Each structure stands twice: as C-alpha cells, then as structure tokens.
Amino acid sequence: MLGVTAFPRSMRRAAFALAAAVALGLAPAHAADFPRQPIEMTVLFGGSSATIAQILADSMSKELGVAVAAVSRTGASGAVGYSYVKSTSPNGYNIVWNSNSISTAYHNGNMDFDYKAFDGVARVGMEVPALAVRTESGWKNLKEFAAAARKQKMKVGVSGRGAFTHLASAALFDKMGIEVIYVPYGKGSAPVELLAGRIDAALQWPSQYKAQVEAGQLRVIAVTSQERLPVLPDVPTAKEQGYNVDAVLWRGIAAPKGTPKDVIAKIEDAIRKVVTGKDFQERAAKLGFEPAFLGAAAFDKFIAADDAVTAKLMTELGLKKK
C-alpha cells in the first residue's frame, strides 16, 4: 500500500488540502455521504417563528440521521442571520429559516444582497398576521377601529421598520385610509406592549395573542389573508370587512448559493416528509401556521415572484431604499 510520500509533491499538497478541508467540514458535499456531521439552521426571529423552526429542526434530525440545530441569529430585520449564512461554505451544513424578510431586509437597505445569494431548498408553510387590540377599547371590527383612528392617531406596534408586519400593517391601514404612528417593540412583545397601554394595536402572529385572547384581555379584529384561519374561525378577514388586503408570510429553508443540487435534494426530501406528516401538521395548526410544501425549483420561482411584489408595495408605501 502506497503512502502519501510516494506521490508527486503537487499531488501530496492536494491530498493534504483535501484532508484539511474534510477536517474543517469544508470539503464538497454530495448526497452519497451527506450528511456526515450536524447541520445548523439559522433562525432569524423569535416568537412563533422560532417555535416552528425548532419543531422542524427536531423532525428533520430524525429524517437525516444527524442533529439539525436551530441557532438564533437575530437582528436588523433578518440581515444578521442572512449575512452569516451567506458567508458560510455552500456544503449543506448551514441553512437558513428564511421568509419574506429576505426581500424586506434587502429593499429597506439593511443588507447589500438579495434572495439571489441563496438557493431555495423548500417552502415549509405560510403564516397570517392578525390585528389585535385591548378588549377594553371596545373596538370589535376594522370599521370601529378606523372611526376611532380618524379622531385620534393610533399607536401601532411593529417588530421593526420595514419588517413584514410593518409592511402588512401599512398595506392594511392604507386600504383603510388612516394614518398611524408606528412604535417598535424593542425587546418587548405585542401582548406586553398592548396590555401596558404603550400601543393601541398590533399586527402579529395569532399564537402570540392566544393566552391573552383566551383570558379576555385582547381581541383579534381581523386577519390579513383572503380566507379565515382555522385557529381563529370567528375572526373575519380584512377583505370580508371591506378592505381587500392579502398579506401572508411564507417561511422555508434556503442554503448558500452554489450548494450541490444533490445535497439540496436530500434536505428537500427530508423537509417534504416532515411537512406532509401528521405530527408536524397537527403541531403547526395549534400555532396558526399552515403547512404548504414547495420543492426547491418551484420555491426559487416563488421567491423571485414574491420579491417583485414586495418591491412594488414597498415603493408605493415609501419604504423601499434599494
């Protein structure tokens, strides 16, 4: 059996380089031996986003046979996490729990690259924002809220300027013909800020309000999808109330541009099995998250089309910087 020293010097250098790359997890990944080490899933936001990401990661671990770790890298409306994953090797071991935020973070100027810096792996599902107010306010629908807002400008909580919930809020209030004051949560959350009286309303994910709604402290007066949510069957859509808004957040998984297609296919297949499975669907339903799987090729086209719509809306609302 020949040792490394039996090969020409140039081949020995290549062999040593490959060995070093393998040791660092940087060697080209292919489905035949993928995955051979844990996978990191960067999570950009907290709340229900992080909860669903953890459920997905745990289930993917079982399908892939290695740990899939959901790691929080928050900040700058997603730009911190996207920038990190973009800087990693395209070998399948670093993926990101992406969403419409890839477009909003770019167009509002938080980062200098857009969705084309990533390869779509799979769309996992959709999440619909819900508008909540304090029950004691007495407002039971959008028309009552609008009437009050015309008398006194309302303070509306947002998770960040240019974030999807800000964009959806602006689209809704534009249709309603009212102007509001946007107040960032900082380190707070929608229910906390609402109950403390620091804001008058907030457009956020239904799961965030669940406990306070059940306790009778908060009331959800609208959702921004075209159809009612199974988790909030008695809450009418904005469209039902005369304001034709369709603002739905998608969530999925992406990898750095150039990740081998066969590696993407293997992760995609694991996600498909998870998302179409009964356990994930039941747990997602409790959070108001709607599983809606799309494979890699279709997901890439979906993101490109959604980016164009987002750019147009942000331009119309004066939020687009890029």
Image: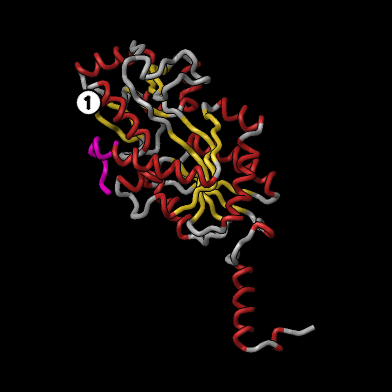
* Image position of 87 with respect to 115: above or below: below
The residue positioned 52% from the left and 34% from the top of the image is: 125
What main secondary structure does the magenta stretch of the protein show? Answer: loop
Q: Position of residue 186 (x, y in %)?
A: 36, 38
Amino acid type indicated by mark 1: Glu
The residue positioned 37% from the left and 44% from the top of the image is: 103
State which quadrant residue 22 falls in.
Answer: bottom right
* Image position of 303 with respect to 259: above or below: above
Could you say which is closer to the camera, residue 95 or residue 31? 31
Range shown magenta: 313-322
Q: Which quarter of the rendered picture does the N terminus lie within?
A: bottom right
Q: Position of residue 113 (x, y in %)?
A: 36, 54
Could you say which is closer to the camera, residue 302 or residue 160? 302
Sort mark 1 into few (<14), some (14-19) or many (20+) by Cα contacts within 10 Å.
Answer: some
- Under circle 1, the secondary element is loop
Residue 30 within the segment the image draws in magenta: no
User: In the shown orientation, is residue 164 left or right of residue 25?
Assistant: left
The residue positioned 61% from the left and 55% from the top of the image is: 262
Q: Which residue is disc 1 drawn over?
A: 179
State which quadrant residue 155 falls in.
Answer: top left
Outermost residue on the left side: it is 151
Q: Position of residue 105 (x, y in %)?
A: 36, 46
